[in-house]
Image (cartoon, rainbow, N blue to C red):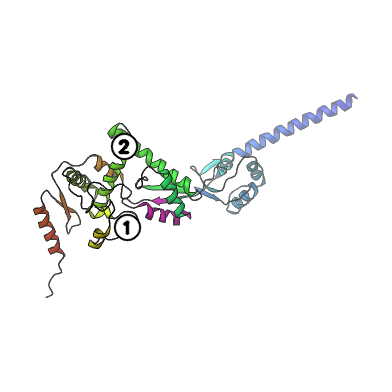
Amino acid sequence: MKSILKLIFRMILWIENLFLLSVMALLFYISLPVKSDKTIHIPPHSNSESIITQLALEGYNVGKIDAMILSKFPSLPSGDVRFKSPYLSRLDFLHQLTKARPPLLKLMLIPGETKEIFFQQVAQTLEVNQTKLLDAYTQLSSYPEAGIMADTYLAPKKMNERNLIKFLLRSSTRRYKKMAMKQFNDYNTTQWKEVLTVASIIQKEAANTKEMPLIASVIYNRLKKKMRLQMDGTLNYGIYSHVKVTPKRIKEDNSTFNTYKHKGLPSSPIGAVSRHAIEAALHPKKSDFLYFMRNKEGVHDFTSTFKKHRKNIEKVKKDRQPLPKK
């Protein structure tokens, strides 16, 4: 009986030593460095074995033990894995594989662009539905236009339409609130819509950011004198974003965006606005200018009287006339 007990005790010690050696070996193994590229793509529906097989085929020093360790992590999402360091411990390397994220695609909302044109581009880039984007924007945005600030955004390809709009609006609203609190010590959407409306006209009319405060001064000066704004840019709203404004269009358009007919500001912003346009709307240049005309250099000449403005118009017409043939 004693010999049996001794044998059992020895077996227990042997098992304990073997377990201890195994643990030490595993700890040593997972501490070994693994060279990692900056980005690894994990396809959808991958499991631990398929991921490790893929990495082994790509030249990574991984095998069955790594597949076993990886299988113990709770989730294995698909997407891109980006490594900040070219060398990681094996455990860190395997852990990073569980942090895959869908690839981010660049969405560029150009200053002055309308939501219809922007969502058309977004739908093509992210392979989502344009109508659903417009519907979600209408439901969630505080502003008919300019709810999304003109900027470059990085968005995951797999995000649905409603969540994508939430993401874009959240980012813009946060910035709008910060600017409004600084200027007014309050974020009132009715007040801010007027700021965005003025900024959107500035965005359409200004030749560059330097001109923006001067364009703003003309807008406010004309409003103060109860003059119609009479600016072509206000008619480039919605689907007409890139449509040339003609006398026929001015005659037939009866919307509030037709500032040749309608007094005051349009009922809502015309297009997306940049930070520069908002700053100009909040801080216009002090002047007595009421008119501006684009010259042959592509920038504007500003005047305070119609007589001077008329001279600038004639000058532009003369500059546009073709030179006589010799």
- The x and y percentages for residue 297 are 18, 57
**Which circle, 1 or 2, is nearer the viewer?**
1
Farthest residue, direction bottom? 326
Q: Which residue is drawn at the image coordinates 38% and 40% (left, top)?
A: 173
- The span picked out in magenta is 105-127
Please state which of residues 156 and 284 is positioned toward the viewer in this rendering: 284
The front one of 301 and 311 is 311
Magenta span includes 158: no
Which image quarter is the N terminus in? top right
Asked where in the image residue 69 lies, by quadrant, the reply is: top right
Check disc 2 and give the amino acid type: Met
Q: Mark 1 — residue?
A: 240
Identify the residue under disc 2: 179
Q: Position of residue 59 (x, y in %)?
A: 58, 52
User: Which residue sits at x=24%, y=62%?
Assistant: 248
Does dot 2 land on a helix, a strand or a loop?
A: helix
Which one is nearer the viewer's eye here, 108 or 241?
241
**Left or right placement of residue 244 versus residue 103 in this view:** left
Tag 2 or tag 1, which sits nearer the N-term?
2
Instruction: Tell me if residue 118 is in the magenta stretch.
Output: yes
Quadrant of the image occupied by residue 89: top right
Residue 270: give its label: none
Against 23, residue 51 (above or below) is below
Number of callouts in the render?
2
Q: Residue furthest top?
A: 2
Q: Are marks 1 and 2 in contact (CB under 8 Å)?
A: no
Q: Quadrant of residue 253?
A: bottom left
- Label 1 vs label 2: CA separation? 29 Å
In the image, residue 112 lies at what x, y percent?
31, 51
Q: At label 1, which amino acid type do we have? A: Tyr
Residue at point 44% right, 51% down?
A: 133
